[in-house]
Image (cartoon, helix red, strand yellow):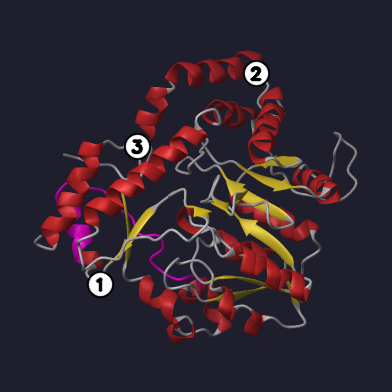
Amino acid sequence: MNIPFVDLKTQYLSIKQEIDKAIFEVLNDANFIGGEQIGDFESKFASLYGVKHVIGVANGTDAIYIVLKMLGIGVGDEVITTASSWISTAETITQTGAKPIFVDIDPETYTINPGLIEEKITKRTKAIIPVHLYGQMADIVAIKNICDKHNLYLIEDCAQSHFSEEKGRLAGRYGVAGTFSFYPGKNLGAYGDAGCIITDDDLLAEKCRMFANHGALKKHEHQIEGINSRLDTLQAAVLNVKANYIINWTNSRISNATFYNTTLKNVEEITLPIVRNNTKHTFHLYVIRTKKRDALKEHLRSMGIQTAIHYPTALPNLTAYKYLGHSRDDYPVASRYQDEIISIPMYPEISKEQMEYVCNGIKSFFKL
């Protein structure tokens, strides 16, 4: 049996008629930039999230960068973020001219450890960007309290946490803004790059929309210099269809994670993901940990089971950040876990039979 890590084709086939119709309408109208589908999606996502403003942009990386720029963060400033994430979270800080300040991760949740944040705050610190990783929200209440205490901006990176919750409040609703990626493999994914910013701040929303559109709210009326980061009509049309299914897909992910938890709970040589109290973990990824990671990955590959590693190198250990002079010992948890984590197949459409095959593969490796 071959088990893909993500099966986007099966998802497409399940809603093929609606997707094809939505794409055909865009092609028929030939309105590829600025079509009405963009506003429709922004309104739909705003309604689902209960937020005032949704600004569609070209991708999740731009979403972070735009928010940072429009908050006035730049040269001489510092922004605190996690030691374990995709590079987008950190590189956008550098792109503004500011300096990324890394904080090690919580050993149970893999998200930024709030107990280590305050020692990194200086007079140059302007913001904190926690990443709600794998679908698990960071301890956002504790982080917000730190931001409020030190008068710092809180920007939530929600690229992997669509519709995750803490105490009934959705990811992205605690900070001044939340940023999302709709990369195809995300829980809510387009058929190309896409992203958005959410905020309840009227002025920030207007500035972000302006900056993302060459500094103009109306064509040719450029109030500032901006960038070109627009959600295109085709991607918005796809997202409009998929948004109707995201809640059911999310529930399926949670159900699938429960199956994995139950079936693998007696495998003592692996560590399963936890779910923090009073939260909803939406399982963008199902990540386990084992000291025999590489051998397990090869064993599963030999059985036709595709896996991935998110992420093989902690951010401070990347060559890109060598100039900061960090060592692995500066971030002991993130540095150790980069050699132990492995993501196994997780998507709404995966069948019980497929998950059983994955679990049996893991058990056979550990001779259970």
Name which residue lies at 66% across and 56% down.
64
Residue 127 seen by the camera: no
Where disc 1 sits, the SS reads loop
Where disc 2 sits, the SS reads loop
Q: Amino acid at mark 1?
A: Lys
Q: Which residue is mark 1?
A: 291
Does the magenta-highlighted stretch encompass residue 312? yes
Residue 338 seen by the camera: yes
Q: Position of residue 18 (x, y in %)?
A: 50, 18
Q: Give how far apart the Cα atoms at labels 3 and 2 are.
A: 30 Å
Query: Which quadrant of the view contains residue 349?
Result: top left
- Quick check: 352 above or below 362? above
Q: Earlier along the polypeptide chain: callout 2 or callout 1?
A: 2
Q: Position of residue 65 (x, y in %)?
A: 68, 57
User: In the image, is 220 to the left or to the right of 334?
Assistant: right
Q: Marks 2 and 1: which is nearer the front?
A: 1
Q: Amino acid at mark 3?
A: Asp
Q: Marks 3 and 2: which is nearer the front?
A: 3
User: In the image, is 284 to the left or to the right of 215?
Assistant: left
User: What is the residue that sits farthest to the top in this orientation?
Assistant: 28
Q: Amino acid at mark 2?
A: Ala
- The disc placed on residue 7 is 3
Instruction: Provide the residue span drawn in magenta.
Output: 295-315
Q: Which residue is mark 2?
A: 30
- Quick check: 33 above or below 367? above
**Marks 3 and 2 close (CB-CB < 8 Å):** no
